[in-house]
Structure formats: structure tokens, C-alpha cells
Image (cartoon, grey):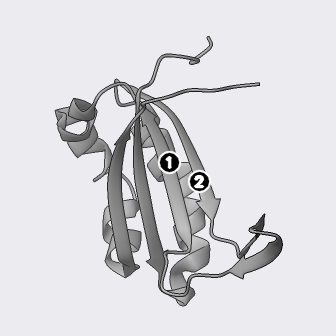
Amino acid sequence: MSTEGKTKFLYNVALDVTPEREALFNEVYDHDHIPALMDVPGVVTVRRYRRRPVKIAMGGAVHAFDFEGEPTYNAVYEIEHPEVLVSDAWAAAVEKGRWAPEVRPFTRNRRLTLHELISDHRK
């Protein structure tokens, strides 16, 4: 089933994890946490990213950016509406499995944002 045009909201979770828990963080996020959240009604997709330095051409020159202090990991959740994040199903899912006891206490520099789609252009 195509999700094109279905979601109008992005919930963005950016954070760091203590280095000694990084392997566990990635394992639990991909194999426990995301599957639990994908079962929540209104969650359409979840994509994870790792921050990388940026080089961009602008103003006639190439500029390099690596914003120290910005979180290393980023998860982007496409959701159908903001109420998904306060639903009973979401509340239960974020406490499931190893995430809450073994990973969450070792995360830091957390930034949570919600974005509403205002324009959509595709090739």
C-alpha cells in the first residue's frame, strides 16, 4: 500500500547515546523499539539517520559544516496526526521491551520536534 499523500506530520527524535551503549542502542532501536511503534495506529513509517558533516555549494564557494553539539542520531516518524503521540497505544509502545530499562537512561542531548507538511514537491 502506498503512503504517498497519507501523512502530513513528521515527528523527529534526535539524540545521542553514551558510547559504551551505542551497539545496544542501534540493535534495540531497529529490532525492538521501531517494530513496537510501527504497531501504533497512525504511525506510517520510521526512518533512522546518523549525522554526517555537510559540504554545500552556495554563494560561489563550497562550505563545510559539522555542527558540534548536534545530536548524532535522528529518527523521523511519519504520523497521520499529532494525537498519535499521546495515544494509549503510543504510551504502551515506548515502554515495551529493552528500550525503557536498557537504552533510554543512556540517551542524552534529546531534541523532539513535530512538523506539519506545508508543501510537497516530488520528481
Query: Residue at left 38%, top 54%?
Result: 97
Query: Closer to the camera, 59 or 92?
Result: 59
The answer to whether the residue labelled 1 contacts the one labelled 2, judged by CB atoms less than 8 Å apart, is yes
Q: In the image, what residue type sits under mark 1?
A: Val
Q: In the image, residue 62 lies at what x, y percent?
A: 81, 75
Query: Closer to the camera, 66 or 50?
Result: 66
Side (left or right) of 31 relative to 117? right
Q: Which class describes the residues within 10 Å of circle 2: few (<14), some (14-19), or many (20+)?
A: some
Q: Quarter-wise, where is residue 102 in the image?
A: bottom left
Q: In the image, residue 68 lies at what x, y percent?
A: 54, 87
Q: In the image, residue 42 lies at what x, y percent?
A: 36, 25
Query: Residue at left 52%, top 61%?
Result: 74
- CA–CA distance between discs 1 and 2? 6 Å
Counting residues from the start of the chain, the first of labels 1 and 2 encountered is 2
The disc label shown at residue 56, or none: none
Q: Quarter-wise, where is residue 3 in the image?
A: top right
Figure label count: 2
Query: Residue at left 44%, top 71%?
Result: 15
Q: Secondary structure at mark 2?
A: strand
Image quadrant where one finds the C terminus: top right
Q: Quarter-wise, where is residue 14 in the image?
A: bottom left
Image position of 63 with respect to 6: above or below: below
The disc label shown at residue 48, or none: 2
Q: Which residue is mark 1?
A: 76
Q: In the image, residue 9 lies at what x, y percent?
A: 39, 33
